[in-house]
Amino acid sequence: MKIKPFKGIRPPKELVEQVSSRPYDVLNSEEARKEASGNPKSLYHIIKPEINFAPGTDEHDPRVYEAAKEQFEKFKAEGWLVQDKEERYYVYAQTILGNQPSAISSQHDKTQYGLVVGAWVDDYLEGRIKKHELTRRDKEEDRMKHVRVLNANMEPVFFAYPHRDDLDAIIARVCAGTPEYDFVAGPEGFRHTFWVIEDKKTIEQITAIFAEIPAMYIADGHHRSAAAAGVGKELKIKNSKLKINNPEYEYFLAVCFPDNQLNIIDYNRVVKDLNGLTSEEFLEKLKVDFEISEYRNTEISNDFSEVKPRRLHNFSLYMDGCWYSLTAKEGRYNDADPIGVLDVTISSNLILDKILGIKDLRSDKRIDFVGGIRGLGELKRRVDSGEMRMALALYPVTMQQIIDIADSGNIMPPKTTWFEPKLRSGLVVHELN
């Protein structure tokens, strides 16, 4: 992998909590408007610039992109974002705190350490940065417009790399020093810690080690990766006669985590109806492909640990106020197929399609998806409210499954992976000039 340090544009440490935000794609315009209310320093004014207009303004209006540029220039002029004078790498650590309520309580006190780098556009275009999801052209184009207008990557993408002991040792040494930022951000309550790597020898070591890594994997941010690489390619073609040495626009903002530290949680399903079946008929049809047992414990705890899927090919079903355990029978799936072995594939083929008639997870309005960070309690709530008829909880995929699928050139089914914590935006920005 070819990476480079860069002159990051960052908030002063006393402003980082005001400037930083959640990623643009985890909340809608009104939620961003509410979170940014009364805070002109919030990055939402740049990454969700429609909040600077009247409610209902089309977020793809050309004026909205221009407003993002105006806000970016304002942030720099006001000193809310300041560029480092030298090229740096950075370490970004995310911690799930033990004293914070969380739907991933079994992972409390877990920290993952990422290196913030400039990733090479050609590594993406030539397939060394590997993807496992399809992207939508309209979403790519939206992010490309944002990058073009701002001439910057405002938000990082989230990569995984095959872990290396030598990189772990360097990161541990850096993190023994005083962090530049250290704060807990709401509403999730995760801790975000950030160090600046200034030592030139350490920077050279990191670059050299990455040169030995054959591939990286997109964990989160497929559309941002495609958009950043697309703009980089455009600028490379446009400036091909200028003979610029290693130009900044050939790189984009990424945080790279070792694959053995990442936290993948479940991505669950809720369905509006049983396709004309009664509950009894639905359960009978399930018995063809699954071993079924009902949870009899009426004192199920608030974290629902008793009813969570225990292993691959085990599912939890909630319906009519009851939880059921479903285990796929032998011979109903292909463990030798990297796609067929996935529980999202098994549940889609044997339950959603075969019994409920849901053919396309991307477009069918009868199904919705709930990230595991919300917990199984959210599944129960949506069924008990009458909004949904049943819920299905899945065992999370593993990082190795993602790597196997990406290495084989395959694509995962929709709504398969959910990574937590999400990257905090606004800790560092990468400009393309």
Image (spheres, grey):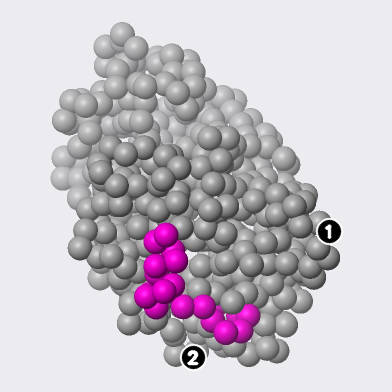
Left or right, residue 421 beside residue 323: right
Residue 30 higher or lower than 91, as above or below:
above
Give me the residue at 28% from left, 65% from top.
40
Nearer to me, 29 or 72: 72
For disc 1, the neighbor class at 10 Å (few under 14, some 14 to 19, many from 20) is few
Q: Position of residue 192 (x, y in %)?
A: 39, 72
Camera sees residue 305? no
Give me the residue at 69% from left, 72% from top.
4
Q: Quadrant of residue 86?
A: bottom right
Q: What residue did someone put label 1 on?
A: 241
Residue 20 higher or lower than 126, as above or below:
below
Q: Position of residue 412 (x, y in %)?
A: 59, 37
For disc 2, the neighbor class at 10 Å (few under 14, some 14 to 19, many from 20) is few
Q: What residue did someone put label 2 on?
A: 177
The magenta stretch spans which residues?
70-90
Q: Quadrant of the C terminus?
A: bottom right
What separation in Å lies between label 2 and label 1 (alpha carbons)?
A: 44 Å
Q: Position of residue 383 (x, y in %)?
A: 22, 30
